[in-house]
Amino acid sequence: MICLGIESTAHTLGIGIVDGKKVVANEKRMFFEKGIHPRKTADHHAKFFDEVLGSALDKAKTSLEEIDRVAFSQGPGIGPCLRVSSVAARTIGLLYNKPIFGINHCVAHIEISKHLTGLKDPLVVYVSGGNTQIIVEGKSQKHYAVLGETLDIGIGNMLDNFAREIGENGAREIETLALRGKPSVPLPYSVKGMDMTFTGLQTDAIKRIGKVRKEDLCSSLQETAYSMICEAAERALALTKKRSVLVCGGVAQNRRLQEMLTTMAKDWNCRFGVAANEFNADNGAMIAYVGATMKKERGLPANKCIPIQRYRTEQFIF
Ligand code: FE2
């Protein structure tokens, strides 16, 4: 079974191919201009679609005739960007007579990470630009349930917003600056059960720019936000008694967050897992991976291959 996966929920156009459960291509091209301009980003994805597709097919040594399925990221994401993957999947599906599968982006991050780390039924900490959720597997059918989440913005967007206020590109630069700072600045901390909020923290951190060392502020911002995530995750772990913790999504690439969750998991005698950065950043292989594992009857008719901008994690049944 060869499945082609197309990812375009936000700044990354990714095209991946899996053969069985093996990733044989994972090509991507990113567009990032200090934030995401929806139309410009979608134009970029449409412009480079052929190039990225060609390089994925070359790498996998296959062709569109030879693939068995097409999968696309159906949501959640930015409308104009999502439209690129849905139109492309529909076009390839109809032209080459292949079944088409719409995939939830969040579930794709979880599934590929479980596959690559070998963790079974973990507590999932999903952290990205637009999403921050504490997730467990559902019991009655193949789906996920959200135990806790951000009540306002995703942690990645909060870090990116703050980064732009200090003239940096995004969360990655905050991580580098934090390495040279100390978590000495008191910032608001907000966990409500297993839910969290980040806008108060963001506003307070922005107000302190220029009044304290930039490096100390970055370190304090990271420590506060990641402590909130660890507290929510620990509460979920105590409740569910899971034996492992998995972190996934764009922000899962952050070393400090990985360290803090490792310590928390150890305290509870749990295994901790995180996939390689390539699969925590947005990518097409994870979409292809879930597409390949889905039941045939979950394929979509062409007129249903449309974006679902606010696609909830728990809505996707596969
Ligand atoms: Fe993502």
Image: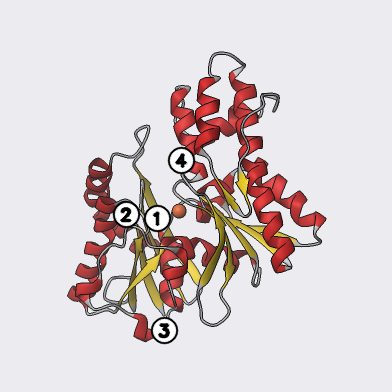
Q: Which residue is denoted by mark 1 in the rendering?
A: 27
**Camera-side mark, 3 or 4:** 4
Residue 308 picture quarter:
bottom left
Q: Which residue is denoted by mark 2 in the rendering?
A: 52
Circle 2 SS class: helix
Residue 96 higher or lower than 160, as above or below: below
Whichever of callouts 4 and 1 sits on the residue coming sooner in the sequence is: 1
Q: From this viewpoint, is residue 256 visible?
A: yes
* Residue at the far top in the pictured view: 211
Circle 3 SS class: loop
Q: In the image, which disc is placed on residue 209? A: none
Q: Between 74 and 116, which is closer to the camera in this rendering?
A: 74
**Three-letter residue code for mark 4:** Asn
Whether tag 1 and tag 2 are in contact, CB under 8 A, the answer is yes
The way the protein has been coloured in the rendering is secondary structure
What residue lies at 69% left-to-right and 68% top-to-bottom?
Answer: 240
Q: Between 95 and 99, which is closer to the camera in this rendering?
A: 99
Q: Position of residue 73 (x, y in %)?
A: 36, 62
**Three-letter residue code for mark 1:** Glu
Q: In the image, which disc is placed on residue 295? A: 3
Q: In the image, which disc is placed on residue 157? A: 4
